Image (cartoon, grey):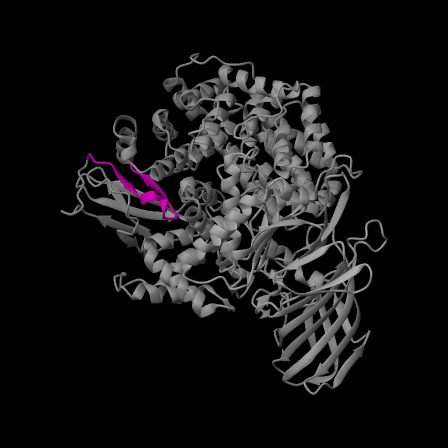
């Protein structure tokens, strides 16, 4: 599943560098709940197959039973030990009849009362009249339910057709624990069985599911029965079906189709998704040397969808804006993002579908691999986009932020409750796990790694796996060339990273004797006396001034303890005045800190030598590591700020994207400083050369990376008040408002709208709001919802927030869009944060009810509070924020762990301000020339607002 975040722009990055579309996310830090037991099935029975029959009336617009459904499931099962009853999962269903027969077809139960229903554990218990002996049985259950409104289970969604009419559809989202809402079942990831499915629906609609249609027959004058071929043995959460009147485009030879509302299909908005799907599955089959298992592979864009996308085997579902790309209206970044999302979900067809985790504790076996595969497969499908290079700044450096908290969790984390399971879909499961697997790919070598994955997939296909199974397969691959260190085994390496929370910083120092000393320790943003001392089995490599080869990422050696020493060799020599850089291409999941002399030598090479002699991914690493090491107190800010001054000659995208994230944090934190104008001047001096080189208009010759880099540069030029930037962007929006032009260059649209709205009057604000309100283009709505939050007028922001609670339908928000409005406001500096806190305090009940309608995991307020905590920057805000959170916890909207994480994040910011304000102010006074920039009329509070929008659609 493609992770989303309730707070679409809650990342600190000012420009969207590709962190998953709509990271409308579950909480950044995981929820380490007190272990709760009793939610697991007893596993004394197991399914052999399911036969499901469902009837929906969603086509019957206006009828009283339009959103009702009726069902019958027949489960062929095996009793594994003598039992008195059979326990299944269910959720929000009314069971009306049960029938149980044995292998001899003797009826044991056939009534409407021989069962109990436990709403806490969601157990449906079938009560047998006597002990059931080991053997095979058949269980039939009749039930009915209602299509849900919270985008979970079997639920309803709608769209507006070309004539302005509302059209309803019935669709599904079962991961992680919602298959039980569509039919009683064994709803656990390690339990598999083939599934047969019949859907009865209106004959003006059609039905699709994981498998091809086997037959379609009229049931009566208005209903049709669609029966599908049986699935292969699969988990219940991967079942999917949609009843709609959608249109589709197909690639018949490759057995792929893409479904969406008819307007999007007729506009050609899904043609790229079809093309990408065909290319990506071919890339994955080639890389893994394993074939795709199902006879077809369809995609469908759903208007209301809580997650970003879902990997249902043979029928991948997406939030519709994630699947749409229009070559004339969409920015280039949308093409890349769509390819990346498709590659993530198609990666799941192997990791998660073909091989599933035995329990949710090992979710990273799904999401970590899908995250890795999204970069590998999308890059193979579209090499010109250089997608694989973006994994460092998008996944690895993003994971570094949440995993540097004391409240983080290990990759292997045991949970049982549905709420705790949902909370596992976090940065650890996706970005950290994907980055750790990328580390293994480079540490073992790509050829060995691929061989190990094939062994794993071949051995465990249609089975439930644990990390031990993966380690055994990789060990087999590692042993074949027989060149792996004899004192290491894959299992020990795996559990070094999967069972420990956090990650290391590798300290590198060089003495007068030319000996390099390595030392590792856990990296924490905020030092903790309670932190457990830890070491990792850490692969390391390095390049030097005399051997500046960054191409091979195989390890030079492994650090197996806390420290090690390296001495020069004839084949790999260095002198005391040579720079040394560890972790080539930042493939290892750790930060690197150097002694003062080494930092000086590296900085000197960047400034006065050939900065391109250092790989651009390592330049991005040096930027991110230095700024974050300074943030955590491991390094002086004078070192980090001096290093990043080299960017006046940087033209590569990835280093700029890395800087963008670091500058966004400093910009937010320093906005209250008396020397803030000096900081703006400092940023202007960094970006001005490249800003003028790239310009403010797109060029036909622009590469994907050129377009992304230009947006970063425009963003910062406008943020710090460049008159040239502000004049051009504001005039472009003014022309749109005056109807002098239809719209703005798609690749510049986000930054222009945000800049134009920062200090816009009420009429301009309402013009853009009305444009959003009328738009039927989901991608356009994402951009405009975010742009409206850029306003720095508290009254307009309050009005905007109030529209997110509209229940009349006048505001036309989808469930997932309401929370976007809130996040678009609070990420926009002091005015936005304080307006959002006040609004949350006054409307928590309604926010919890309405925002969770589109929130995966149902923790809208918890996710919002996590994002807001990152923006609390002073003691006054901190006190107000904690008081609000205490009230939210008392009302049940925050759990204790969410409160603790929010307190840790906000507290770290306040501590940073107390420690670093003076240090940075003095450095700026000594190193920045004042008054060199022509500054437009922009208020200090407005400066931070551009940062949030470009994330929407680069």
**The residue stretch that appears in magenta:** 577-595
Name the one closer to the observer, 160 or 905.
160
- Provide residue 848's location: percent of width, then percent of height: 71, 44
Residue most extreme to the right:
64
Residue for point 34% across, 43% down: 585
Instruction: Please say whether residue 200 is visible from this viewpoint.
Output: yes
Q: Is residue 853 magenta?
A: no
Instruction: Please say whether residue 533 is visible from this viewpoint.
Output: no
Residue for point 56% across, 14% down: 937
Residue most extreme to the left:
570
Name the one closer to the observer, 668 or 212.
212
Residue most extreme to the front:
253
- Provide residue 218's location: percent of width, then percent of height: 77, 64
Is 723 placed left or right of 419 in the picture? left
Name the one closer to the observer, 368 or 63.
63
- Provide residue 77's location: percent of width, then percent of height: 65, 77
Name the one closer to the observer, 904 or 473.
473
- Provide residue 224's location: percent of width, then percent of height: 76, 61
Residue for point 71% across, 52% down: 244
In terms of image quadrants, where is residue 297?
bottom right
Is 206 placed left or right of 454 in the picture? right
Q: Is residue 585 magenta?
A: yes
- State how many labels appear: 0
Is 370 placed left or right of 595 in the picture? right
């Amino acid at each position: 599943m493609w992770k989303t975040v309730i707070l679409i722009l809650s990342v600190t990055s000012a420009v969207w560098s590709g962190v998953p579309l709509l990271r409308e996310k579950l909480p950044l830090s995981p929820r380490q709940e007190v272990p709760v037991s009793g939610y697991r099935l007893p596993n004394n029975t197991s399914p052999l197959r399911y036969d499901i029959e469902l009837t929906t009336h969603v086509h019957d617009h206006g009828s009283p039973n339009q959103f009702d459904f009726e069902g019958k499931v027949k489960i062929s099962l095996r009793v594994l030990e003598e039992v008195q009853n059979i326990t299944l999962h269910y959720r929000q269903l009314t069971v009306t009849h049960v029938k149980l027969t044995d292998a001899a077809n003797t009826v044991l139960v056939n009534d409407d009362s021989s069962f109990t229903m436990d709403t806490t554990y969601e157990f449906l218990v079938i009560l047998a009249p006597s002990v059931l002996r080991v053997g095979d049985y058949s269980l039939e259950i009749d039930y009915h339910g209602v299509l849900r409104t919270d985008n979970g289970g079997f639920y309803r969604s709608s769209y507006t057709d070309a004539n302005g009419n509302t059209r309803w559809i019935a669709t599904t989202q079962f991961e992680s624990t919602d298959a039980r809402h569509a039919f009683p079942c064994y709803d656990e990831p390690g339990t598999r069985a083939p599934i047969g499915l019949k859907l009865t629906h209106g004959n003006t609609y059609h039905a699709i599911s994981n498998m091809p249609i086997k037959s379609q027959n009229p049931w009566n004058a208005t209903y049709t029965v669609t029966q599908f071929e049986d699935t292969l043995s699969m988990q219940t959460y991967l079942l999917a079906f949609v009843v709609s009147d959608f249109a589709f485009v197909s690639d018949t030879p490759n057995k792929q189709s893409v479904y969406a509302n008819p307007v999007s299909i007729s506009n050609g908005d899904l043609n790229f998704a079809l093309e990408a799907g065909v290319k990506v599955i071919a890339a994955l089959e080639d890389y893994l040397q394993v074939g795709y298992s199902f006879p077809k592979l369809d995609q469908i864009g759903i208007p209301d969808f809580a997650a970003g996308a879902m990997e249902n085997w043979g029928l991948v579902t997406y939030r519709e804006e994630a699947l749409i790309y229009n070559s004339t209206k969409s920015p280039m970044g949308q093409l890349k993002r769509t390819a990346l999302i498709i590659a993530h979900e198609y990666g799941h067809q192997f990791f998660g579908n073909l091989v599933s985790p035995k329990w949710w504790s090992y979710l990273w076996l799904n999401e970590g691999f899908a995250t890795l595969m999204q970069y590998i497969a999308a890059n193979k499908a579209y090499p010109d986009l250089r997608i694989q290079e973006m994994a460092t700044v998008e996944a690895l450096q993003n994971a570094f932020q949440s995993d540097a908290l004391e409240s983080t969790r290990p990759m292997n984390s045991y949970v049982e409750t549905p709420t705790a399971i949902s909370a596992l879909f976090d940065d650890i499961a996706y970005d950290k796990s994907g980055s750790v697997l990328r580390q293994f790919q480079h540490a073992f070598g790509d050829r060995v790694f691929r061989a190990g994955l094939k062994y794993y997939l071949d051995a465990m296909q249609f089975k439930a796996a644990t990390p031990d199974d993966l380690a055994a397969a990789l060990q087999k691959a590692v042993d074949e060339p027989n060149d792996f260190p004899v004192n290491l085994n894959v299992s020990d390496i795996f559990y070094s990273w999967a069972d420990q929370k956090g990650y290391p910083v590798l300290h590198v120092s060089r003495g007068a004797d030319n000996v390099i000393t390595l030392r590792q320790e856990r990296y924490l943003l905020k030092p903790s006396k309670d932190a457990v001392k830890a070491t990792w089995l850490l692969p390391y490599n390095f390049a030097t001034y005399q051997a500046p080869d960054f191409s091979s990422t195989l390890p030079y050696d492994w650090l197996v303890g806390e420290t090690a020493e390296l001495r020069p060799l004839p084949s790999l020599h260095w002198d005391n005045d040579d720079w040394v850089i560890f972790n080539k291409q930042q493939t290892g999941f750790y930060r690197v800190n150097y002694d003062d002399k080494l930092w000086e030598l590296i900085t000197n090479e960047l400034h006065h030598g050939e900065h391109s002699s250092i790989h651009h991914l390592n330049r991005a690493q040096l930027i991110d590591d230095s700024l974050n090491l300074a943030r955590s107190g491991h390094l002086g800010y004078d070192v980090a700020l001096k290093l990043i001054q080299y960017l006046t000659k940087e033209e590569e995208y990835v280093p700029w994207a890395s800087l963008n994230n670091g500058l966004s944090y400093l910009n937010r934190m320093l906005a209250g400083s008396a020397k803030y104008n000096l900081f703006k001047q400092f940023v202007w001096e960094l970006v001005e050369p490249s800003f003028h080189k790239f310009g403010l208009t797109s060029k036909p010759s622009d590469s994907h990376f050129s377009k992304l880099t230009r947006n970063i540069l425009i963003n910062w030029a406008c943020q710090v008040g460049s008159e040239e930037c502000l004049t051009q962007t504001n005039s472009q929006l003014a022309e749109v408002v005056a109807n002098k032009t239809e719209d703005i260059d798609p690749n510049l649209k986000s930054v222009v709208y945000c800049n134009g709205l920062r200090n816009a009057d009420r009429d301009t604000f309402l013009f853009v709001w009305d444009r959003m309100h009328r738009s039927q283009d989901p991608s356009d709505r994402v951009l405009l919802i975010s742009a409206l939050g850029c306003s720095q007028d508290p009254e307009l922001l309050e009005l905007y927030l109030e529209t997110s609670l509209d229940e009349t339908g006048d505001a036309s928000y989808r469930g997932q869009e309401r929370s976007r409005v809130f996040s678009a406001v609070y990420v926009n500096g002091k005015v936005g944060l304080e307006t959002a806190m006040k609004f949350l305090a006054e409307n928590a009940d309604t926010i919890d009810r309405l925002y969770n309608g589109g929130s995966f995991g149902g923790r809208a307020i918890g996710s919002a509070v996590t994002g807001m905590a990152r923006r609390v920057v002073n003691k006054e805000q901190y006190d107000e924020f904690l008081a609000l959170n205490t009230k939210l916890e008392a009302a049940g909207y925050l759990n204790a762990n969410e409160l603790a994480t929010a307190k840790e994040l906000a507290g770290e910011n306040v501590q940073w301000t107390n420690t670093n304000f003076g240090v940075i102010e003095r450095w700026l006074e000594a190193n920045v020339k004042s008054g060199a920039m022509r500054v437009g009329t922009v208020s200090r509070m407005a400066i931070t607002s551009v940062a949030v929008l470009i994330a929407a659609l680069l």
